[in-house]
Image (cartoon, grey):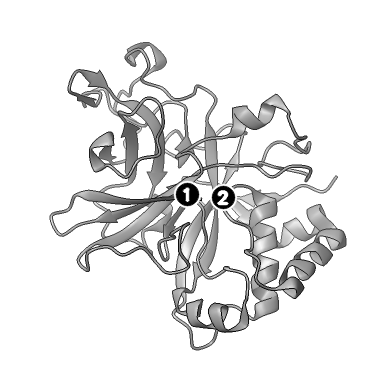
């Protein structure tokens, strides 16, 4: 079986996907499938981008529409596809596992409740997209232990840290009880892509799939709203950092996540083990005028 090809630049924190390698993985049958989706019109493309098949399908739909447009508002973005292989660096973008948190920093705690580490976004490889990010890594903790799906800013704690491998960090034995979402992390493999929010009018006029913004975990680009084709309505002074999205691996395709060649079958326990994040939603992250992280949540 052909495998997705990954590479890593010198000094980079994340592995990068070689997009052209996916054609050999998914082949002509899946090309026909993406063509059929476009021909029917009125359907969405891949909804929440989680793995290589979702991203590959989206790209072929976009190519058939003729994106990126020559005169559109095209915004580069770094999208993260999930992998079960060991992360190349402990500060890499991830769901679950241990946070890249120095032991000199207190574990987030609020109203007598310890935070639960959910995910981290690493901006080090994406500085050309979000140069205003205050530090290298944004750690995301939640205080609603039943769900990370919340519109309430107070249910989250956002902690910025820089990469410093010499600084002692929290190990499993240092974490308070209930402080980890999962000890089996998924880490992000980066792929440079784009959003084109100006495509909304054409999508409505021609009944095209909603492929203008990427509904997945990403840095830069344009924010996604799962309940609307339009971008989220937020204060003008908020600057978009990126977003983290629910991880829902695709069934019955090779590499539902990177590092696992075998397709997922319906009802397989591994699906629950691979599912991560904010319910079936997307949390868009912004930096407000005071330098605080603000969020916009939407669900399917």
Q: Is residue 141 left or right of residue 290?
A: right
Residue 273 versus residue 60 in the image, above or below: above
The residue depicted at 74 percent of the width and 67 percent of the height is 37
Q: Is residue 151 left or right of residue 211?
A: left
Q: Residues within 10 Å of mark 2 (few under 14, many from 20)?
A: some
Q: Residues within 10 Å of mark 1 (few under 14, many from 20)?
A: some
Residue 270, disc: none
Q: Quadrant of the N terminus?
A: top right
Gap in angstroms between the C-alphas marked 1 and 2: 6 Å
Residue 198 versus residue 294 in the image, above or below: below
Discs 1, 2 touching: Cβ within 8 Å: yes
Q: Position of residue 292 (x, y in %)?
A: 19, 49
Q: Position of residue 245 (x, y in %)?
A: 48, 47
Q: Secondary structure at mark 1?
A: loop
Extreme residue toward the bottom, this view: 71
The residue depicted at 78 percent of the width and 70 percent of the height is 35
Q: Is residue 194 left or right of residue 236?
A: right
Residue 12, disc: 1
Q: Which residue is mark 2?
A: 8
Q: Secondary structure at mark 2?
A: loop
> Residue 228 occupies which quadrant of the picture?
bottom left
Q: Position of residue 123 (x, y in %)?
A: 38, 51
């Amino acid at each position: 079986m052909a495998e997705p090809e990954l590479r890593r630049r010198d000094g980079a924190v994340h592995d990068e996907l070689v997009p052209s390698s996916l054609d050999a993985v998914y082949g002509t049958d899946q090309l026909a499938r993406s063509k059929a989706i476009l021909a029917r019109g009125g359907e969405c493309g891949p909804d929440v981008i989680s793995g290589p098949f979702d991203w590959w399908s989206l790209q072929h739909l976009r190519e058939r529409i003729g994106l990126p447009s020559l005169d559109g508002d095209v915004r580069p973005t770094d999208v993260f596809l999930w992998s079960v292989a060991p992360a190349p660096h402990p500060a890499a973008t991830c769901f679950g596992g241990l946070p890249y948190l120095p032991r000199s920093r207190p574990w987030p705690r609020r109203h007598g409740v310890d935070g639960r580490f959910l995910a981290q976004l690493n901006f080090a490889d994406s500085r050309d997209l979000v140069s205003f990010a205050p530090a290298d890594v944004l750690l995301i903790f939640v205080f609603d232990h039943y769900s990370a799906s919340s519109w309430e800013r107070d249910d989250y704690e956002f902690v910025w840290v820089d990469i410093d491998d010499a600084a002692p960090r929290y190990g499993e034995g240092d974490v308070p009880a209930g402080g980890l979402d999962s000890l089996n992390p998924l880490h992000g493999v980066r792929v440079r892509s784009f959003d084109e929010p100006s495509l909304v009018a054409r999508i409505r006029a021609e009944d095209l799939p909603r492929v203008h913004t990427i509904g997945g975990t990403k840095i830069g680009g344009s924010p996604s709203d799962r309940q609307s084709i339009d971008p989220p309505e937020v204060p003008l002074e908020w600057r978009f950092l990126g977003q983290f999205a629910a991880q829902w691996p695709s069934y019955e395709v090779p590499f539902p996540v990177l590092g696992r060649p075998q397709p997922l079958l319906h009802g397989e326990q591994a699906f629950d083990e691979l599912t991560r994040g904010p319910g079936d939603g997307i949390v868009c992250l912004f930096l407000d005028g005071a330098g605080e992280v603000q969020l916009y949540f939407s669900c399917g």
